[in-house]
Image (tube, helix red, strand yellow):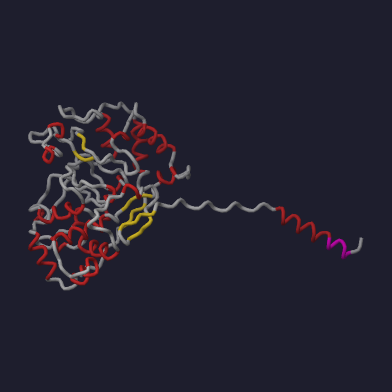
Amino acid sequence: MKPGLLVGMLAALFAIGCAETPKEPPEPAAPQGESFTSGNYTAALPLGLQAAAAYVPENNPMSAARIDLGRKLYFDPRLSKDGTVSCATCHDPDKGFSDARPTSMGIGRQTGSRNAPTVMNRLFSQEQFWDGRAADLEAQALGPIQNPIEMGHTLQDMVSNLKNLSGYAPVFQAAFGSPDITPDRVAQAIATYERTVLAGNSPFDRYQAGEKTALGESAVRGMALFNDAQRANCVTCHAGFNFTDESYHNLGVGMDRPNPDWGRFGVSKNEFDKGAFKTPTLRNVSQSAPYMHDGSEATLLNVVDFYDRGGLQNQWLSKEIKPLRLTAREKTDLVAFLEALTGEVRGTGKPTLP
C-alpha cells in the first residue's frame, strides 16, 4: 500500500471515531422563582415562593424609591426616643431578622414579654404581631415606635426628628412625589422594604424542583413525618409553601403561669382564642432561635420535644395538639427537615443613613 493512501485511511478512521464520540448532555437549567409585580416594581422571587399569595395594599404599591426609603428608616435608630433602637435592633438580618433573645429589649434596656418574630416572608401575610392586632405591615410599623418599652416615641416627635435630618426630604420626594414627612408615609415605606425580605431557594425547594440530592436521608424521613397525619402532622398548622396557616392556636405555652399571656383573646375577645398565638413561618427557622411567643424553647429539638409531649394541657388547648410519642431518631429527622428549610435570604443589605 502506498504511504499516502495509508495516511488518508487513518485520517478518515480518526474522523469517524471523533464524530461518534458521545457528547456530554447539557447541564439542566437551574429552577427559577416566580415573577412578582407590584406597581412599577418587578422582581423574581426565590425558588419555592408563590407570587399569587403576595399581599400589597392598593394604596401602597411598591417601587424602588419606596424600598430605598423604607430600608433607611428600618435601620435608623433615630426613630426611637433616645436614638438607640431601630426596627433592625429586634429584627436583625444577622439573626434571622429576629434578635436571638427570649424577649426583646427596648430603650433603657427595658424587656418586653414576647419574642421578636422574624420579618422574613411578610409579603405573604396580612395580620401582624403574635396576636394579629395589626391589620397589615403598615399598621404594624408604627406600633413599636409608640410602645414605651420598645422605641418609646410619639409619632409627632418621631416625624419632627426626621424633618430635622435634611437628607430625608429628597428621599421622601423620590418615594412619594413630595418631601412631606408623615407617620403614614413612614409606615408605608417601612412596610414596603419589609416586603422585600424574602427567604426561599432552600434545599427543600430544590428537592421539590427535582434535585433529589438536595436533601439528605434524615431530612427526607423528617419531611415524611412532618406531612404524616398519623404521626407528627406538623403540616396541619405549618401549611403551604410558607409553612404557616396564618391562624392562631393554643399550644399551652406559658399557660401554667399565674398570669398567662392571653394572646389572640386580647384582640378578638373570643373565649376560644385564649392563649392562642399566630403560627409562624418555618422558612429559615434555624436562624431565629429561641422559639415560641415567649422564647421559652432554646432549640429546634426543644420545640419538637414540646410538641411530642402534647404541648401543655389547658382548657383552651387546640384540638390539633396531642402527644406524638416519637422516637429519638424521628425527632432528629424532623429537626433535619426543619433545617433544610433554610435557604437564600433577600433584603439583607444595610443602607447609608441620611
Residue range in magenta is 3-8
Give the quarter of the figure containing the N terminus.
bottom right
Quadrant of the rendered image containing residue 311:
top left
Task: Establish if 202 lies above or below 40.
Answer: above
**In this rendering, position of residue 38 left or right of residue 147:** right
Considering the whole magenta stretch, tell me its main secondary structure: helix
Q: Looking at the image, is 119 positioned above or below residue 337?
A: below
Please check the rendered image and state whether residue 5 is part of the magenta-colored stretch, yes or no. yes
Quadrant of residue 307 in the image? top left
Toward the viewer: 85 or 55? Answer: 55
Q: Within the magenta stretch, is there residue 145?
A: no
* Image quarter of the C terminus: bottom left
Work out whether 14 lies above or below 238: below
In the image, residue 273 lies at what x, y percent? 15, 34
Q: Residue at x 18, y 58 (%)?
A: 187
Instruction: Report the side of 327 relative to 177 (left or right).
Output: right
Give residue 51's position: percent from left, percent from top. 35, 50
Regarding residue 95, the answer to whether it shows in the image is no
| Residue 105 on image: x %, y % | 14, 52
Residue at position x 32%, y 44% in the image = 242
Percent position of residue 18, x then y = 72, 56
Residue found at the far front of this picture: 58
Does residue 241 appear in this view? yes
Extreme residue in the bottom direction: 166
Instruction: Tell me the quarter of the picture where residue 244 sits.
Output: top left
Q: Is residue 235 above or below residue 22?
A: above
Name the residue located 41 percent from the left edge and 37 percent from the top edge: 218
- Residue at image x 25%, y 42%? 280
